[in-house]
Image (tube, rainbow, N blue to C red):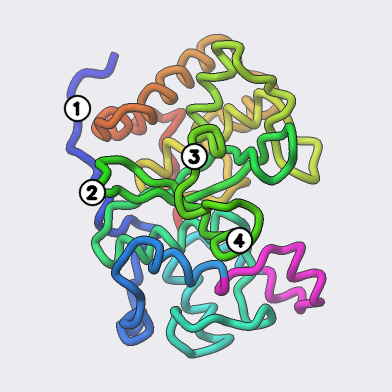
């Protein structure tokens, strides 16, 4: 049983994967100071693998899709174009990455300005009708509204959604929210999964719940990273005890007390191993 609560998680400062160590401050100097100003540049810094393929980027360019730290992503970006990060890049000069990379860079920019922010792993309902697609977003704390505001930086300035700067309830479900809904019988798990793959169902929700807990602890991993009992869960080899653990994960991710998520994250089944954080 969990006994002693740990300290509150400081979301206004960088974590291991959102710091800008070794980056010239002049590259970051012209970033805005308001949350959406800080998130906006990201959509012109990263290109999805499918879009990169469509413009025939060289194979070696796809390596950034496997990069976790924001500082390494920015260094790769600067090797392509040394301009400050607020300057939009042509598609051919963007780093290749998934929705997770958009979210992590936005979170890193927000934390750089001291704005409390978090990456969330879950599912978006606005890409495919009737489906909840595996997706990552950023959220920041609004003192004015006293709430976390969810932003999809990947589609800012686009036409996918009218308000990507402030996602409405139900448009994005975190892994924990999706798991709780599944356990209550409110959703059909077969409609939750990874677009373009056969990976759909409760196993995908389990995985995203664990990844969301890690992200709330400032370890924003790659979408395909696995640790603890996640591989067994994806393979359908876990039982009721693991599902009950995920009930606790979902509850921890839903509370406003980050000490609960911090304490739960210490469990070996949920904690990201050191050799995976690089």
Alpha carbons under labels 1 and 3: distance apart: 31 Å
- Residue 241 appears anywhere in the view: yes
Q: Are marks 2 and 4 in contact (CB under 8 Å)?
A: no
Q: Which residue is mark 2?
A: 144
Alpha carbons under labels 4 and 1: distance apart: 34 Å
What x and y, as percent, mark residue 207?
A: 58, 33
**Residue 252 drawn above or below residue 88:** above
Q: Determine which of the numbered discs, if any, sits on residue 168 in the image.
A: 3
Q: Residues within 10 Å of mark 1 (few under 14, many from 20)?
A: few
**In this picture, residue 213 sits left or right of residue 99:** left
Task: Identify which residue is drawn at 49% across, 56% down.
Answer: 103
Q: Determine which of the numbered discs, if any, sits on residue 188 in the image.
A: none
Stretch of the chain drawn in magenta? 44-62
Alpha carbons under labels 2 and 3: distance apart: 17 Å
Mark closest to the chain's N terminus, 2 or 3: 2
Quadrant in the picture for residue 108:
bottom left
What x and y, as percent, mark residue 34?
A: 31, 65
Question: Does the segment drawn in magenta span residue 55?
Answer: yes
Q: Are marks 3 and 4 in contact (CB under 8 Å)?
A: no
Mark closest to the chain's N terminus, 3 or 4: 4
Q: Quadrant of the N terminus?
A: top left
Q: Residues within 10 Å of mark 2 (few under 14, many from 20)?
A: few
Q: Nearer the viewer, residue 242 or 46?
A: 46
Secondary structure at badge 1 equals loop
- Residue 275 appears anywhere in the view: no
**Residue 79 drawn above or below residue 271:** below
Secondary structure at badge 3 equals loop
Q: Determine which of the numbered discs, if any, sits on residue 5 in the image.
A: 1
Secondary structure at badge 4 equals helix
Q: Which residue is mark 4?
A: 66
Mark closest to the chain's N terminus, 2 or 4: 4
């Amino acid at each position: 049983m969990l006994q002693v609560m740990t300290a509150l998680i400081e979301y206004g400062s960088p974590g291991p994967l959102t710091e800008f160590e070794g980056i010239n401050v002049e590259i970051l100097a012209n970033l805005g100071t308001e949350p959406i100003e800080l998130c906006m540049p990201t959509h012109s810094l990263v290109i999805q693998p499918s879009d990169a393929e469509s413009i025939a980027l060289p194979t070696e360019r796809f390596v950034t899709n496997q990069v976790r730290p924001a500082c390494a992503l920015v260094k790769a970006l600067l090797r392509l174009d040394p301009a400050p990060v607020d300057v939009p890049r042509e598609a051919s000069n963007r780093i290749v990455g998934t929705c997770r990379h958009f979210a992590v860079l936005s979170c890193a920019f927000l934390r750089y300005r001291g704005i409390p922010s978090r990456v969330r792993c879950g599912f978006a309902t606005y890409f495919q009708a009737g489906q909840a697609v595996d997706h990552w977003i950023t959220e920041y704390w609004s003192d004015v509204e006293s709430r976390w505001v969810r932003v999809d930086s990947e589609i800012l300035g686009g036409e996918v959604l009218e308000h990507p700067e402030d996602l409405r309830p139900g448009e994005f479900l975190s892994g924990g929210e999706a798991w709780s809904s599944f356990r209550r019988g409110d959703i059909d798990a077969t409609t939750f999964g990874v677009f373009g793959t056969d990976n759909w169902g409760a196993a995908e929700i389990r995985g995203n719940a664990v990844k969301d807990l890690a992200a709330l602890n400032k370890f924003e991993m790659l979408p395909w990273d696995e640790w603890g009992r996640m591989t067994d869960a994806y393979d359908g080899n876990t039982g009721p005890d693991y599902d009950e653990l995920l009930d606790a994960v979902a509850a921890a991710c839903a509370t406003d007390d980050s000490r609960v998520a911090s304490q739960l994250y210490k469990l070996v089944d949920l904690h990201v191993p050191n050799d995976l954080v690089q």
